[in-house]
Amino acid sequence: MTSTLPDLSTLQDETLRFAQELIRIPTVNTGDPRTIGDGEARAARYLQSLLEEVGYETEYAESAPGRGNLLARLRGSDPDRGALLVHAHLDVVPAAADDWTHPPFGGELHDGFLYGRGALDMKGFAGVLVAIARHFARSRTRPRRDLVFAFFADEEAGGVFGVRWLLRHRPHWFDGVTEAISEVGGFSVPLGAQRAYLVATAEKGIGRLVLTARGTAGHGSRPTADNAVTRIARAVDAIGSHTFPVIPTPAVEAFAERATALLGERVDLSTIDQHPDLLGTAGPLVAAALRNTVSPTIIQGGYKSNVIPGEARAEFDVRVLPGQEDALRREVEALLEPGIDIEWDRWVHPIEAPSSGPLLDVMAVAIAAEDEQGVVVPYLMPASTDNKHLASAGIAGYGFTPLRTDADFDAFGHFHAVDERVPVDALAFCAWVTERILRDA
């Protein structure tokens, strides 16, 4: 790696400006292509202009009208090292403006915070990446490995018009890539006297379970022994009240080992979800990573109060740990009475990358350079990101967008929330740390 003296003040200023401008471009993803406009295309074209302004060659691709994706590659000094993909998604979930203190698409600054839909998820990090790419171009920095800067559409609805489309139609975008960095992780949480910056080395898989019960239809005045509504209600209760066992995974065990050392007391995975306060704001997140979960979300049956329907159905949100897909199916099906139709649908497999290695070592050094009390701690992320789709191409994905925040700021809690916001100084911290990581990885 070679570079001139870095201009971190410009890096910081541009990070904030680009994040604000991205928030002001509404890129709302409703999940329904008929209601999605051209926001992702506008956001990608905006970033394209910023990158080409400092000399990058970019590639732009629309998977459908208005669904823009963007890539730029910076060649490293060692072509034999695998390329590192750093990526952010440009779409955001909807926001009801009347519920917000400040306009969700205003990108406004108030009391040291940048407010707006996407401030954390994840236009703030998109601003960081473009600012770093421009900084490297101006300072003629040549990193050790190829860096691939990518900005994707449609993450919030499963990546159909983003990463999944690109893997089929633009596979060369990922040539030589072995590892990736994106959401969700890097937010500081207090553990003992230290600040732990959690890196997601694994993610739960996701899916949908649909159950259908059938029975004899008839008049409500003549009860039937095989009432479909009653049968589906028993099935929902059986699954909804079931306690799935704690299943330690490598990522969770690595977290427990580091947390035990930092806290000076043993973190017992078998009971930690009963005592989440021990881990502060990280407690609920870790608790959600200990078990498979199957949550009832929809129940349907009948169309008139005096008619016994012949069919009733229920849907469940499924989150499964790495290596547990077949076991989870067997465990759930054993809870059901005979005659219930079972459909496992929309299955996205869990992923797990190594919980130690050179890239995590670089992250740890970069954090320590900016925060002497900071340590990097692996964890399992109980939700889903674009890294899942990249795993199908053999790319090991990590969630690490480093933010140093006050102990009472729950960054995870601001995802998809009203008044989503990020501390301005934390965004600058993210730019400084990420710049070190990308230089030295």
Image (spheres, grey):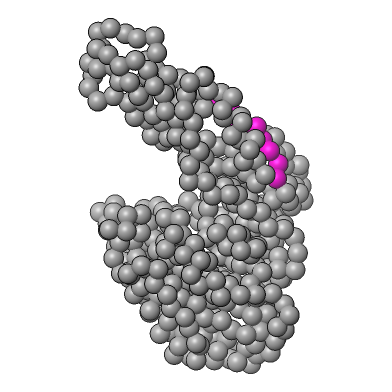
Q: Quadrant of the C terminus?
A: bottom right
Residue 196 percent location from the top left of the image: 65, 57
Front position in the image: 66 or 342: 342
In the picture, measured across the screen, residue 118 lies left or right of residue 261, that is left
Residue 265 percent location from the top left of the image: 76, 43
**Vertical side of 434 occupied by 266: above or below:** above
Residue at 60% x, 59% y: name it.
392
Given the current orientation, which residue lies at the most extreme top position?
222
Q: Is residue 416 magenta?
A: no
Count of numbered tags: 0
Residue 359 percent location from the top left of the image: 70, 68
**Vertical side of 252 occupied by 65: above or below:** below
- Residue 403 appears in the rendering: no
Front position in the image: 28 or 360: 28
Magenta stretch, main secondary structure class: loop
- Residue 350 appears in the rendering: yes
Front position in the image: 91 or 169: 169
Residue at 68% x, 38% y: name it.
247
Q: Quadrant of the N terminus?
A: bottom right
Residue at 60% x, 92% y: name it.
140
From which residue to which does the magenta span run?
Answer: 242-249
**Vertical side of 422 occupied by 254: above or below:** above
Front position in the image: 134 or 351: 351
In the picture, measured across the screen, residue 396 lies left or right of residue 11, that is right
Residue at 48% x, 51% y: name it.
413
Residue 153, image quadrant: bottom left
Residue 377 percent location from the top left of the image: 68, 57
